[in-house]
Image (spheres, rainbow, N blue to C red):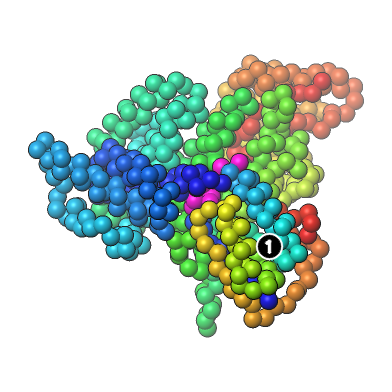
Amino acid sequence: MLYAVLCYNSEEAVFSWTQEQDAKVMADLAQVQQRWSAKLGPTARLMPTTAATTLRKGDTPLVIDGPFAETKEQLLGFYLINGDDLEDVLTFCKELGAVNPGGAYEIRPLHYFANGVLPADATAPRVSESA
Amino acid sequence: MTDLAWIDAALTSARPQAVGALLRYFRDLDTAEEAYQEACLRALKNWPEKGPPRDAASWLIMVGRNAALDGVRRKSKLTELPPEDMISDTDDVETPMAERLDGAHYRDDILRLMFICCHPDLPATQQIALALRIVSGLTVKQIARAFLVGEAAMEQRITRAKGRIAKGETSFETPGPAERAERLAAVMSMVYLVFNEGYSAGPNEAEPRARLSEEAIRLGRLLQRLYQTEPEVMGLTALMLLKHARAAARFDADGAIVLLDDQDRSSWNRDMIGEGLALIDKAMRHRRAGPYQIQAAIDALHARAATPEDTDWAGIDALYAALEILQPSPVVTLNRAVAVSKARGPAEALAMIEPLANALGGYFYFFGARGAFLLQLGRHAEARVAFDRAITLANTAAEAAHIRGQIDRLSADAAGRASAADRNPAGRKPAAPRLSGS
């Protein structure tokens, strides 16, 4: 079963981390991801919501600066994981949470999934070497 | 990351909102800061046991407010109580408080807190120190280290600055649109001052001061969350990110400054560049250009160039032309001339800076650039005069050494054609030239 794991945390707190703290959390998370690599699909870390733009649908679609919802915690990243069951995915989330405190993980089973093919030059500031 | 480190980050990020709200309640900065301190102490005791609250800022405001009111009550024989409407509801309930915070208030709270640091009577360095202390919550020791002064001296400077603003009038009314725009403009330039204080640091002081640049970026993001549709706020944050992205490449192993053209572009921070480019992309959609956006767009063109030769100099020339209209200044024109020399050749660049001779007659970079253009044109004797003048105006040994390198090259090259001359990087504030290689 495919699940999306949506990572929520206070971005003000996360973006207050020093570079060393950030690097440590990312390195610790990479270890968890490594352990689960057989089940893990795409993984993404999002830029802060200050970089977000929202398109509100309608007869005249409205482009709004900022995220869709103003919340205490923001969507900062996501994983796709091929979990055995909910318990399996919860175990994964607990391991992630142990090295990255604060916030919450929302686990959402997938209804439909298309494994699109990104062009080779698709890019983000940081791309995993193993990708 | 440990829980304690997480709590630390949560306290840091909640600070502007919490102190800003407490300032609105108590209308006194010292009381607000003490209340916040007290709340932080309780958080450090309380959160590890009971887990952090969902909304750290609301928790701190509520606990800080109650703690300060207790203090006020204890001292009530000596001190007049705040008016009733300021005390109002002191129930130990988080929800109503959180709801109240969702209102428009908190935006004005944070802006007010930042704005009081921009008092026009305060010199720039004091504004910066005050903002770092009050808004960012850096310790006096950290700030003193960044400014390379003793702790006692910095303590005194901050106390004096606080005294100045305490005497001034701070409006606690909800600001109107015009006043809000004015405050925002003042706060943006203060944030950029904080950034430049870090950015202009030399190699030996780069480490403690880099902290200031990072803090300014954090404040920029904070402003952007408050004013999501302001393209100039996006521009300011983008500008700071794009410049700070080059931090690791700006000095060589010996601490000499490395010019933009000579920097190792693989050591530029791609995360910051990516975010900066995304922000400038968003800002441009508004079609309301401003100085921060234009400067960010110039740095974006540098960031997009994989090698110095790929730089879109014609685009940079056009952006400086736009900046000249919005913010006319001889230094902007001088920087534009550097782009012109790349895009259209040294003759046009030289013609462009001739009229600046009076305004920039005491400016090192003017003569450095003039010498470089003349050198490119093969007018060696005149180049030499300009370089000699530059040396007498050099502010640092590194600047003088760089020009001496140019002169050496001039002598060596006397018979042959001039090699591609070194130049000022196209930053607004020209960076010091590098020490010339052997």
Q: Chain of mark 1?
A: A
Residue B109 vs residue A87, the one in the foreground: A87
Residue A36 in the magenta stretch? The answer is no
Image coordinates for residue B224, horizontal then vertical, percent: 48, 54
Residue B318 seen: no
Does residue B435 appear to the left or right of B163 in the view shown? right
- B51 shown above or below B155: below
Q: Which residues are magenta?
A: A12-20
Residue B321 vs residue B186, the one in the foreground: B186
Residue A17 in the magenta stretch? The answer is yes
Q: Residue at x 37, y 25 (%)?
A: B155
Residue A26 seen: yes
Image coordinates for residue B112, horizontal then vertical, percent: 34, 47
Does residue B282 appear to the left or right of B19 in the view shown? right
Q: The disc labelled 1 sits on which kind of residue?
A: Thr
Q: Which residue is mark 1?
A: A43
Residue A61 vs residue B419, the one in the foreground: A61
Q: 10 Å neighbourhood of mark 1: few (<14), some, or many (≥20)? A: some
- A110 shown above or below B197: below
Q: Residue at x 61, y 24 (%)?
A: B204
Q: Residue at x 73, y 56 (%)?
A: A34
Instruction: Determine whether the residue tagged by mark 1 lies in a helix, strand or loop.
Output: strand
Look at the image and tell me in which quarter the C terminus of chain B lies.
top right
For residue A130, what is the image quadrant?
bottom right
